[in-house]
Image: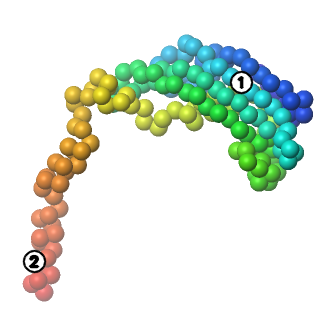
Amino acid sequence: MQVDPFRMAEARRILEGDVPLRQLRRLGALLEGDTGVARVQLEFGTDEMGVRFLKGRIRAELSILCQRCLEPMPWHVDLELALGLLHPGEDEAKAGVYEPLMVDEVPMHLTDLLEDELLLALPQIPRHELAVCPAREYVEPEGQAQATAGTKDNPFAVLAKMKTETSNEE
C-alpha cells in the first residue's frame, strides 16, 4: 500500500487492518512459514508542537527457527510505533519526542515500513527458553559451564611458565 504520509498527517487519518505475512518477502525469508497476518493500527497526525507523526501498533505471531535445536518456535510481536515524519535533509531534532523517519519517496510503501519494524523486532539469535528447548539435554546450564571453566587447564599456562623461566635466566 502506498501513502503520502504528510497528507495523511494533515488529514489525521487512521488506518487499521491485517497485512498477510506472505506479502512481506524479506521477513518471510527468516520465518518458518508465511501464514498468518500482522495486525496493524496506525494513526497519522500533527502534535501540538507541529511535528507530523505516525503512531501505532503492530501485532503478529511469527514462527522462527530456534538456533539451538533448529526447530520452529513461536515469536510474539507487539510493537508500539511513534515516528516523526521528516523530509530528506531536515534536522532529526525536528522529530521531537518521536523516532525520526526520513520519508525519501512520496508516496511511500507502507508495507516496507511495517516489514522493517517487524525485522527489527526479531531476535539476533532466536532460541527457545532452555527449559522447553528440545536440545536442552545437550546444553550445560550457564552456572555449571562457568564453574567447570575455572577448573580446566589453561593451554597457555606452559607458555607463561616458559616465559617466566626465560626472563629469570637473563
Disc 1 marks which residue?
41
| Residue occupying the point 16% across, 58% down | 154
What x and y, as percent, mark residue 69?
A: 32, 26
| Foreground pick, 23 / 75 | 75
- What coloring was used for the rendering? rainbow
Along the polypeptide, which appears first: circle 1 or circle 2?
1
Q: Please, which residue is most extreme toward the bottom here? A: 170
**Left or right: residue 155 compared with residue 50:** left
Q: Please, which residue is most extreme toward the front here? A: 48
Q: How many marks?
A: 2
Disc 2 marks which residue?
165
Name above or below for residue 46 compared with residue 64: below
Quadrant that contains the C terminus: bottom left
**Left or right: residue 22 compared with residue 145:** right
Local SS, label 1: strand
| Residue occupying the point 55% across, 27% down | 77
Quadrant that contains the N terminus: top right
Name above or below for residue 143 compared with residue 37: below
What x and y, as percent, mark residue 96?
A: 77, 50
Label 1, label 2: how far apart the Cα atoms are? 71 Å
Amino acid found under the numbered disc labelled 1: Gln
Q: Is residue 72 among what the camera can see?
A: yes
Q: Is residue 107 among what the camera can see?
A: no
Q: Residues within 10 Å of mark 1 (few under 14, many from 20)?
A: some
Amino acid found under the numbered disc labelled 2: Glu
The quarter holding residue 11 reads top right
**Left or right: residue 16 compared with residue 4:** left
| Foreground pick, 23 / 20 | 20
**Between marks 1 and 2 in the image, the one whose residue lies nearer the viewer:** 1
Name above or below for residue 86 compared with residue 119: below
